[in-house]
Image (cartoon, helix red, strand yellow):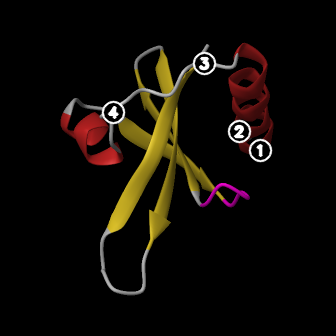
Amino acid sequence: MRKVWIAAALVAASLFDAAAQEGVTVDSLLKQGYEVKAAFPSNAGPGLVLQKGDAVVMCFVAETKKSADVATQYCKPVH
């Protein structure tokens, strides 16, 4: 069931072509009370699905060899 939900989130994000939320990071979403509900590999980098109530956001992150931090590439709302 979880895989179906993740697939549905990916399809919805691509179909609605939501604009990337500038300045939104995984860290800022977590501070707003969002929870990580799923993680998945993708060609855009590791993906995270975060949720707070009915609001669902999909973020893509990247790491670098020079830093232990994982940086947010971009986040998009899932409708």
Task: Give left or right: position of 2 versus 30.
Answer: right
**Measured Cα–Cα span from mark 2 to mark 3:** 17 Å
For the magenta stretch, what is the residue range?
Answer: 41-45
Q: Position of residue 68 (x, y in %)?
A: 30, 80
Q: Nearer the viewer, residue 48 or 14?
A: 14
Residue with the mark numbered 4:
34
Q: Is residue 73 above or below residue 66?
A: above
Compared to residue 37, the image places residue 61 above or below, namely: below
Task: Give amino acid for label 2.
Answer: Ile
Point out the frontmost of discs 2 and 3.
3
Q: Which mark is residue 3?
A: 1
Name the residue beneath numbered marker 2.
6
Front residue of this view, candidates 44 and 46: 44
Above-or-below relation of 70 to 27: below
Q: In front: mark 1 or mark 3?
A: 3
- Asked if marks 2 and 3 touch (Cβ < 8 Å), the reply is no
Q: Amino acid under label 4?
A: Tyr
Q: Residue at x 66, y 54 (%)?
A: 44
Tell me how far mark 4 sits from mark 2, CA to CA: 16 Å
**First reached walking from the N terminus: tag 2 or tag 3:** 2
Between the C-alphas of marks 4 and 3, the distance is: 19 Å
State left or right for residue 4 relative to residue 24: right
Q: Assess whether mark 1 and mark 4 are in contact (beta carbons under 8 angstroms).
A: no
